[in-house]
Amino acid sequence: MVLDVDAACRFVSTQLGVAADPEKAPAMQAYMKTDMPFYGVQKAGRTPILRALVRDHQPETVEEYRNLVLSLWNLDHREEKYLALGVARQFEAFVLPGQIDLYRRLIVEGGWWDLVDEVATKLIRHMVVEYPSATWPVVDQWIDDSDMWLRRSALICQIGAKDRTDPARLFGFCAARAYEEDFFIRKAIGWALREYAKTEPDAVAGFINSHIDELSGLSHREGSKHIRDLVKPR
């Protein structure tokens, strides 16, 4: 049966409208520093909608998957974009190297941490871990891209990979962007190092200690949070 994407979008918008809390919407919008409208539906309220969406509107082909994700993404409200990303993650069989152009689009158009980080740490992570030879050549280019969110995505895309992390790339990316002054880049470096330190504390400490003069205070502080006894103070 051909997936009725329009019906899926109507379902999402209708259910979010039913669950909407107009009193919460302005605060959610202000927190995300965006002009994009919110229904005022927090994660707990979105979860049953996502479950029903995934159950009743399943794509059977790559084309249907892409169409569903982008159709939800192109709706007007922030929560609809959150659900688009939820759908993208749930149908893992379609999270393949051929989708990297789609995920790049979501990162660039998302342009803020709540959307970008979900794509980077879930979708891109899955691909660099499961399909490294097909994915890394693309992500390797992102670390020098003019778009800051793509650079951030390259830095954080191995968060959660644990012992499947590519340490040469992780440390190489961090060193390549260590000079940047942007908060989101400095925070990303610290976050990526802190998470990998849970798996390889000595390796992370070695990197921080050997780059102590290049790393920002924020990156150093975040990266050494759980390994302070191994790291030189700045």
Image (cartoon, helix red, strand yellow):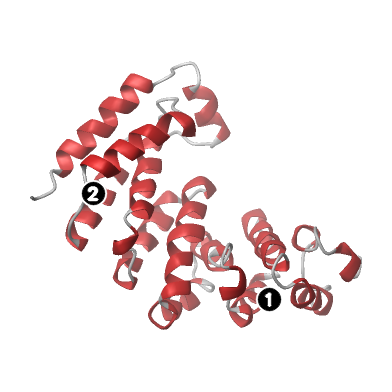
Q: Is residue 156 left or right of residue 219?
A: left
Residue 175: numbered disc? 1
| Quarter of the C terminus within the rendering | bottom right
Marks 2 and 1, Cα distance to the nearest angstrom?
38 Å
Q: Is residue 197 left or right of residue 177?
A: right
Q: Is 204 drawn above or below residue 60 in the view shown?
A: below
Picture coordinates of residue 145, whole percent (x, y)? 49, 70
Q: Dot 2: within a 10 Å radius of its alpha carbon, few (fewer than 14), some, or many (20 or more) residues? A: many
List the residue tagged with mark 2: 68
Name the residue rendered at 58%, 63% in the picture: 159
**Kind of residue at badge 2:** Leu
Q: Nearer the viewer, residue 92 or 194?
A: 92
Q: Is residue 177 among what the camera can see?
A: yes
Q: Is 224 drawn above or below residue 76 in the view shown?
A: below
Closer mark to the observer between disc 2 and disc 1 = 2
Q: Is residue 75 among what the camera can see?
A: no
Residue 228 sits in quarter: bottom right
Q: Nearer the viewer, residue 166 or 37?
A: 166
Name the residue rendered at 80%, 59% in the picture: 226
